[in-house]
Image: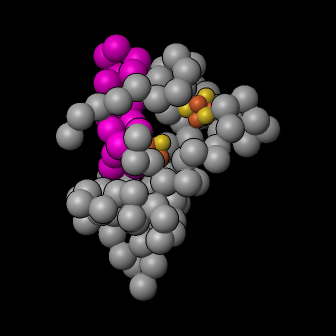
């Protein structure tokens, strides 16, 4: 799968909003499933009749993590679900998640 850049350089060196162990973190709606089409069962799974992005090793399975270079890239950037598109960089939610990620690294 090709790896695309994610939004700003701040996002590519952060990726915090793509980290969680919650298997129901990003729900996919019909528009998301259509956009992912052929990749759907590769990047997502069905839980009790609802579809979610797969999570692996504490982060979205579609996030390519290169800790050595400090890079966190979305491998389905062009097809990412609406929830990811709607998450605004530098919003209150973004700042909270980044603060929590910093605390975990201490
Ligand atoms: S937490 Fe904010 S800065 Fe970090 S990747 Fe997500 S949107 Fe970008
Ligand atoms: S699809 Fe991309 S932007 Fe959305 S959680 Fe996964 S890696 Fe992050």
Work out whether residue 56 or residue 10 is closer to the camera in this orientation and state it: 10
Place residue 43 in its image quadrant.
bottom left
Q: Nearer the viewer, residue 71 or 75?
A: 75
Q: Is residue 89 left or right of residue 76?
A: right
Residues shaded magenta:
60-77
- Residue 70 x, y percent position in the rendering: 40, 18
Q: Is residue 62 visible?
A: yes
Residue visible at 31% across and 24% down? 66
Which image quadrant shows ligand 2?
A: top left
Residue 60 location (% of width, % of height): 40, 49
Image spot of residue 5 (x, y percent): 40, 26
Quarter of the image where the C terminus is located: top right
Q: Position of residue 31 (x, y in %)?
A: 48, 65
Which of 85 and 25 lies nearest the eye of the viewer? 85
Q: Quadrant of the N terminus?
A: top left
Residue 76 lies in the magenta-colored region: yes
* Residue 63 seen anywhere in this rendered image of the structure: no
The outermost residue toward the left is 1
Q: Is residue 1 above or below residue 35?
A: above
Q: Count every numbered label the image shows and give the total.
A: 0
Q: Residue furthest right?
A: 92
Rendered image quadrant of residue 36: bottom left
Q: In front here: 50 or 25? A: 50
Q: Is residue 87 above or below residue 36?
A: above
Query: Residue at image x 72%, y 29%?
Result: 90
Image quarter of residue 104: top right
Picture residue at 40% right of the left edge, 78% below the top: 47
Relative to 27, 57 lies left or right: left
Outermost residue to the bottom: 48
Q: Residue at x 30, y 62 (%)?
A: 37
Q: Is residue 93 magenta?
A: no
């Amino acid at each position: 799968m090709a790896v695309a850049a994610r939004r700003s350089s701040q996002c590519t060196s952060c990726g915090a909003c793509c980290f969680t162990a919650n298997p129901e973190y990003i729900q996919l709606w019909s528009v998301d499933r259509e956009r992912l089409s052929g990749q759907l069962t590769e990047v997502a799974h069905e839980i009790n009749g609802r579809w979610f992005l797969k999570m692996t090793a504490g982060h979205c399975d579609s996030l390519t993590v290169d800790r050595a270079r400090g890079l966190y890239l979305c491998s389905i950037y062009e097809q990412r679900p609406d929830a990811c598109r709607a998450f605004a960089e530098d919003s209150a939610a973004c700042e909270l998640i980044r603060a929590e990620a910093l605390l975990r690294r201490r």
